[in-house]
């Protein structure tokens, strides 16, 4: 296009598209049929949106060609080899007109693994989609980020697209050192951006690396969900690197998914340059294929995300085996002792945990000191071979719980937990994440809230990985929809979701059970107040728990904090005053109690019935395998199983009774809740409730209640003290 030509913006469907021949081995190429290309077009990206511009002369030619093509000529002979195919909307394409026949790989055809690998390999090396768009030419200015280092335009574009205009504290302190290759031990509050703190330097190494096949980094996470999330973050950040590069350059390796598929993908050239893995699955792959040991021994960077969890129990044993295999292979190849860069991150580094590690092997017992991280680092250096003494970066040295999290306490009787969960969600509708210590509690609470017409979803370790991810996706979609309606959406989880997960928009975290350790409480509470936002963390406990487990928890959390330092100077507050009691509207609780009891009975029935059916199926299968009659009366019958069955049976309802309970509950739910039931008429008192109803003002589900917010309520309460 000459400089004198004027350019105009055009739609993609108005351009002069030409057919692209796609090899048959690519099947449907991820659902794209009849690929077409074009020439003489400029591409601009404005605010993340791709636009197409052509010269006015080219536009005229395009219109002329299209008008000519639209005029039928029965006498004209068409040479099919020179035919230009006009672009069609997918809706307009008739069956049989697709350039790639879907029948080539219909479901049910038998295809060998080698054939599948070859087809996938062709797909990975083609990258025909990005052939005409060079995103690296689109310049982005982010001065706050560029002050940290010489970033590639790919990284800057990714940061701009994701809305990260300024680095967080942990990112500002970590990235320059990581880019220089230093080992780092980083501690920062949950939600403070630790993933990008190590992710950006790794991505830069991938982009600037000369060898397109050599692995760049291994990132270990304690859970599958966190591995999936880290993979998504890095992929979104470096989206444009996939132009001309294997689309599996960044990939996760976790359990719960097909290991055969993971093995096949790792055979492709350029795949797995950045691996995000759980230790168990990665060790399984190394033990199955020795070539992977030599391959991943070449990495430049090793990352431990949520390191305190990775270095405990079974994870620690698996991790030490992985390190031993990779270190040995590295020494054998290079002929000398060499190490990769090691980056360790977590929101907590528990002194008690590392004392346990020290007692299991060589090393000294850690003692309380003014610098807890230094003591932890001494123990880490006996377990992990660093190339240098790591630099300690502590982004929150005094407060263990993020300062943006407002904590609150609800004291209630042990059997009233469900009622007060229902009360909180009814009073403060929004996005809420509830943590339970037991999987049975997760199941029951999910059923309980669904009976109360509150959309609820569950994730726990007994669910398959596919179901966990599916429920997370459903929750996020429902939460986004309900947000506009000012209605609640609830996710109920075991501690499998406590660490690392970045679930968008969580406003409230409820601890249905007090966590067993202080570090779990910190990670749970960190699911809210992500980035620059604020959030609420609410503990529900009985008065007995408040004087026992809660007392211990608060003392651990206050150690090393600003409040404790004030206490040492004689001006501190007692631990009980660190957490505010959530104000309770007793009149509203009284109205919700009957609904809560009915919903609890129905939930107990559903959970117990499901469990009984599973038990019966298991017993029947076991009896069939042993060749015995499961219904026979045996004096040696298992007493525990009998008691367990009777306990569940006592929670079930008869068919008619179940229906009656459900009808009664629905009748109650159809009746509105009023803030002050002492008022006989809606128009009585200082507030005209009828007027509020007509004008749709105030609370969405409680008549007479102002539109309350848990965060603002706690702020006002704290300000009055």
Image (cartoon, helix red, strand yellow):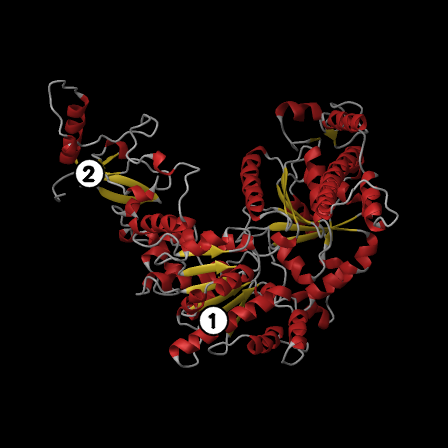
Q: Is residue 96 left or right of residue 674?
A: left
Residue occupying the point 42% across, 54% down: 264
Q: Earlier in the sequence, mark 1 or mark 2?
A: 2
Asked if residue 151 is positioned above or below residue 462 in the image, the reply reads: below
Question: Residue extending furthest front?
Answer: 627
Q: Residue at x 78, y 42 (%)?
A: 629
Q: Position of residue 469 (x, y in %)?
A: 55, 46
Local secondary structure at mark 1:
helix
Front one among 431 and 222: 222
Mark 1 or 2, closer to the camera: 1
Q: Few, some or many C-alpha atoms within 10 Å of disc 1 (few <14, some 14-19, many ≥20)?
A: many
Residue 460 locus on image (x, y percent): 64, 49
List the single residue furthest toward the right.
635
Residue located beneath label 1 in the image = 326
Residue designated by label 2: 54
Q: Are marks 1 and 2 in contact (CB under 8 Å)?
A: no
Residue name at image x 77 percent, y 26 percent = 659
- Residues under labels 1 and 2: Cα distance? 53 Å
Of residues 169 and 386, the one drawn nearer to the viewer in this rendering: 386
Q: Secondary structure at mark 2?
A: strand
Near-viewer residue (558 or 646): 646
**Above or below, 239 relative to 345:** above
- For label 2, count other residues whose C-alpha is less than 10 Å away and answer few (under 14), some (14-19) or many (20+): many
Asked if one can make out residue 188 in the rendered structure from this viewpoint, the answer is: yes
Q: Nearer the viewer, residue 430 or 519?
A: 519
Q: Position of residue 465 (x, y in %)?
A: 56, 48
Picture layout, residue 500 above or below residue 485: below
Q: Residue furthest top?
A: 74
Does residue 423 show up?
Answer: no
Q: Say which quadrant the N terminus sits in.
A: top left
């Amino acid at each position: 296009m000459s400089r004198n030509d004027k350019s105009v913006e055009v739609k993609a469907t108005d351009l002069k598209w030409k057919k692209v021949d796609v090899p048959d081995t690519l099947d449907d190429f991820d659902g794209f049929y009849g690929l077409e290309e074009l020439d003489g077009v400029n591409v601009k990206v404005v605010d993340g949106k791709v636009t197409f511009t052509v010269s006015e002369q080219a536009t005229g030619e395009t219109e002329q060609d299209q008008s000519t093509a639209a005029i039928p000529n029965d006498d004209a002979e068409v040479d099919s080899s020179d035919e230009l195919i006009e672009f069609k909307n997918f809706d307009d394409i008739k069956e049989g007109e697709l350039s790639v026949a879907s029948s080539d790989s219909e479901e049910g055809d038998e295809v060998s693994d080698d054939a599948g690998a070859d087809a996938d390999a062709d797909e990975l090396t083609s990258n025909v989609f990005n052939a005409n768009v060079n995103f690296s030419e689109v310049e982005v200015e982010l001065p706050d980020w560029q002050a940290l280092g010489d970033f590639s335009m790919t990284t800057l574009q990714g940061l701009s697209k994701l809305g990260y205009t300024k680095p967080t504290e942990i990112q500002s302190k970590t990235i320059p050192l990581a880019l220089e290759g230093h080992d780092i031990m980083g501690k920062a509050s949950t939600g403070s951006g630790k993933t990008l703190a190590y992710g950006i330097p790794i991505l830069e190494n991938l982009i600037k690396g000369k060898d397109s096949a050599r692995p760049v980094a291994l990132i270990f996470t304690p859970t599958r969900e966190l591995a999936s999330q880290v993979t998504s973050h890095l992929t979104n950040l470096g989206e444009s690197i996939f132009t001309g590069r294997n689309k599996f350059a960044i990939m996760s390796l976790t359990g719960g998914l097909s290991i055969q598929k993971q093995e096949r993908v790792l055979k492709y050239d350029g795949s797995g340059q950045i691996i995000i893995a759980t230790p168990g699955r990665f060790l399984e792959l190394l033990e199955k294929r020795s070539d992977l040991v030599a391959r991943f021994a070449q990495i430049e960077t090793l990352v431990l995300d949520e390191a305190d969890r990775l270095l405990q129990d079974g994870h620690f044993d698996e991790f030490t085996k992985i390190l031993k295999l990779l270190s040995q292979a590295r020494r054998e190849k290079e002929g000398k002792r060499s190490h990769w860069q090691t980056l360790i991150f977590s929101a907590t580094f528990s002194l008690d945990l590392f004392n346990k590690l020290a007692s299991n092997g060589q090393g000294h017992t850690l003692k309380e000191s003014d610098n807890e991280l230094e003591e932890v680092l001494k123990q880490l250096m006996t377990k992990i071979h660093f190339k240098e003494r790591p630099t300690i970066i502590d982004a929150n040295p005094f407060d263990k719980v993020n300062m943006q999290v407002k904590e609150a306490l609800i004291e209630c009787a042990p059997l009233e937990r469900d009622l007060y969960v229902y009360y909180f969600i009814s009073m403060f509708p929004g996005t809420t994440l509830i943590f339970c210590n037991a999987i049975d509690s997760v199941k029951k609470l999910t059923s309980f809230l669904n009976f109360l017409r509150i959309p609820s979803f569950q994730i726990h370790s007994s669910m398959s990985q596919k179901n966990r991810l599916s429920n997370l996706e459903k929750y996020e979609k429902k939460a986004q929809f309900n947000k506009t309606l000012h209605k609640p959406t609830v996710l109920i989880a075991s501690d499998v979701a406590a660490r690392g997960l970045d679930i968008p928009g969580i406003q409230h975290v409820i601890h249905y059970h007090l966590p067993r350790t202080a570090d779990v409480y910190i990670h749970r509470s960190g699911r809210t107040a992500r980035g620059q936002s604020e959030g609420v963390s609410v503990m529900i406990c009985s008065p007995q728990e408040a004087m026992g487990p809660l007392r211990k928890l608060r003392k651990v959390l206050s150690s090393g904090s600003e409040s404790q330092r004030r206490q040492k100077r004689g001006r501190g507050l007692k631990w009980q005053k660190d957490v505010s009691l959530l104000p309770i509207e007793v009149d509203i609780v009284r109205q919700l109690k009957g609904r809560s009891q009915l919903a609890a009975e129905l939930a107990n029935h559903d959970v117990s019935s499901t469990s009984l059916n599973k038990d019966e199926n298991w017993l029947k299968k076991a009896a069939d395998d042993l060749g015995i009659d499961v219904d026979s009366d045996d004096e040696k019958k298992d007493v525990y199983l009998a008691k367990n069955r009777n306990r569940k049976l006592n929670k079930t309802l008869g068919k008619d009774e179940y229906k009656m309970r459900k009808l009664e509950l629905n009748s109650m739910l159809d009746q509105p809740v009023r803030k002050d039931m002492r008022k006989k008429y809606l128009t009585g008192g200082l507030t005209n409730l009828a007027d509020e109803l007509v004008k749709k003002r105030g609370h969405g589900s409680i008549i007479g209640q102002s539109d309350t917010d848990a965060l603002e309520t706690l702020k006002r309460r704290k300000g009055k003290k």
